[in-house]
Image (tube, grey):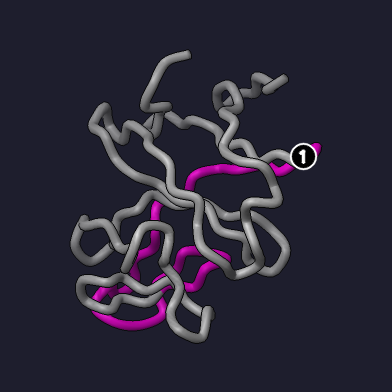
Amino acid sequence: MPEVGERGPAQPLCASAELAERGDAVVFDVLQYSQPARAFALRIDGRVVAYLNRCAHVPAEMDWMPGQFLDSDRQFILCSIHGAAYEPASGRCVGGPCGRGRLATIEVEERDGQVYWYPSRDTQPAFAD
């Protein structure tokens, strides 16, 4: 059963096994400032990270194909529009036109074979239960 914390109730995202190390992302829908948006979760160095699917350079979705965010060496998240590169563990820009920007983080937790994400003041579930 999802737990309720200070940040809002845990939202089931996927089974842990769906996220392979530096593999394809699980993409999910959220409301960002009450507007529909996409987000994604990846497994990086054994832990799950999640971000809003918006480049810090231009607020456009970044995946090359659905769920594919990593470069060919699977080292960096790469924006398909202008090539901005982000460090996957932190979301920090490491190259390209994103400057000192970073991806908007979505808090996630992995427990009991399941990955959950937590709503924030700015990011809410797209569909009410």
For image coordinates 56% across by 43% down, the residue present is 107
Q: Which residue lies furthest to the right in this view?
A: 112
Magenta highlight: main SS: loop
Q: Which residue is drawn at 43% across and 41% down?
A: 28
Instruction: Return the x and y of residue 65 as percentages of the image width and height.
Output: 33, 64
Residue topped by disc 1: 111
- The number of discs equals 1
In this rendering, the answer to whether 125 lies above or below 129 is: below
Residue 107: within the magenta? yes
Query: Magenta stretch: residue 38 in it?
Result: no
Above or below: residue 1 compared with residue 79:
above
Q: Residue at x 62, y 36 (%)?
A: 116
Q: What stretch is highlighted in magenta?
A: 86-112
Q: Name the kind of residue labelled 1 in the image.
A: Arg
Which residue ends up furthest to the top in the rendered image?
Answer: 129
Q: In which quarter of the image is residue 36?
A: top left
In the depicted structure, whether residue 105 falls above or below residue 74? above
Q: Label 1's element?
A: strand
Task: Find residue 64 and report its horizontal and vertical position in percent.
Answer: 31, 68
* Mark 1 surroundings: few (<14), some (14-19) or many (≥20) residues within 10 A: few
What percent of the width, then of the height, locates residue 102? 39, 63
Q: Residue at x 42, y 58 (%)?
A: 67
Position above or below: 17 against 117: below
